[in-house]
Image (spheres, helix red, strand yellow):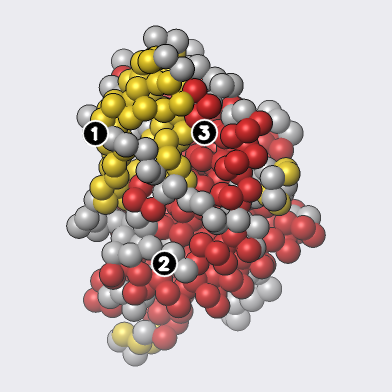
Amino acid sequence: MAANTSLDPMDLYDVDAELGDEERMVRDSVARFVDTEALPLMREAFEQHAFPRELIAKVAELGLLGSSISGYDCAGLNSVCYGLICQELERCDSGLRSFVSVQSSLVMYPIHAFGSDEQKQRWLPALAKGDAVGCFGLTEPHGGSDPGNMKTHARRDGDDWIVNGAKMWITNATIADVAVVWAKTDEGIKGFLLEKNMPGFTAQEIENKFSLRASVTGALFFDDVRVPAANVLPGVSSLKGPLSCLTQARYGITWGVIGAAQACLAEALSYAGERVLFGRPLTHTQMIQVRLADMARRITTAQLLSLRLGRIKDRGELRPAQVSLAKWNNCRAAIDIARDARDILGGSGISAEYVPVRHMLNLESVITYEGTETVHQLTVGRELTGVNAFG
């Protein structure tokens, strides 16, 4: 019996039909950019351990930086549009999506949400246009899952603040013009806008990564960095600040990993259809069909979770535990799909000529950053039971 080919293998539940015209237009324009301009660069970028900086201006021209912000030369798109942007960018590579996520959710968002009018006017248009690059300093060398235990601190000195400490595993660290750095103070946890030329502020790239190789990752060091009061985010003095940023970034990740999973499924389908073993293509075997079907099941579940999450977010009703559930589910689904796709490709699966191994390695980072899988499981568990089991 012939297979029913009327369904899109990447969208079995026709999520496309649930999207508005603007949402489809945004997705399709980013998909074209990925296919024509980004994907041709990504294999070499990954192999060379280099972020393709020539894409920054093109990403900015498409309005992908700070896309959910209204005003300040930003696009003012809804949350589902932002999610679809992340999906298409990560279909290319997690490193490209990470750049946009950090710039948008971890740098522009806190400046917009907690910054002064002067800070917004100075930084948001420049960041939206790609004229400036930002990074987000929260994770520290001794551990990232307990941000309340941060060692970086700041003290008042006249009208200025003196910042000391270090941050680790920071995307965009060595190419950033501004760093949103979170530090403990006697007045609570505050956000500081550290500029790259401030004395005592240095950044060092982390080399020899086997994941996110097409992304800049580094460490930030603060040695008596003098920060004027005008560079302190005035709108927050608690962990609510950085944690709200992470909620924004985690939301984008739930969509992004769908793109990585779709890329792996597409590669597995193509390869299995052409690879002939024991006299027939792999797609003609029950076991391969079961594995491909399981990938489609996981992708479909992830799509529906993220779409629903986006609609909740656009209503202003988003809860952190809802984001945790989707990041946990979708990252786990994507990494399992990438690993299985790599296995279906056999020996070819370890070659950079095929995408699964690159996505598989990248997803080892994505499932860890912005909260490990265990952190999100415990966040959902706390919501269910009312008991905090983190300690």
Q: Is residue 129 above or below residue 378?
A: below
Type of amino acid under label 2:
Pro
Res. 63 in view: yes
Q: Residue furthest left?
A: 208
Secondary structure at badge 3 equals helix
N-terminal-most mark, 3 or 2: 2
Query: In the drawing, does residue 190 fall left or right of residue 18?
Result: left
Q: Measured along the vertical axis of the image, is residue 154 above or below residue 283? A: above
Mark 1 residue type: Pro
Which quadrant of the figure has residue 328? top left
Residue at the disc numbered 1: 141
Residue 159 coordinates in the image, percent (x, y): 46, 17
Q: Quadrant of the N terminus?
A: bottom right
* Mark whose residue sits in front, 3 or 2: 2
Query: Disc 2 or 1, which lies upstream in sequence?
Result: 2
Q: Which mark is residue 245?
A: 3
Residue that carries the numbered disc 2 in the rendered image? 52
Q: Which mark is residue 150?
A: none
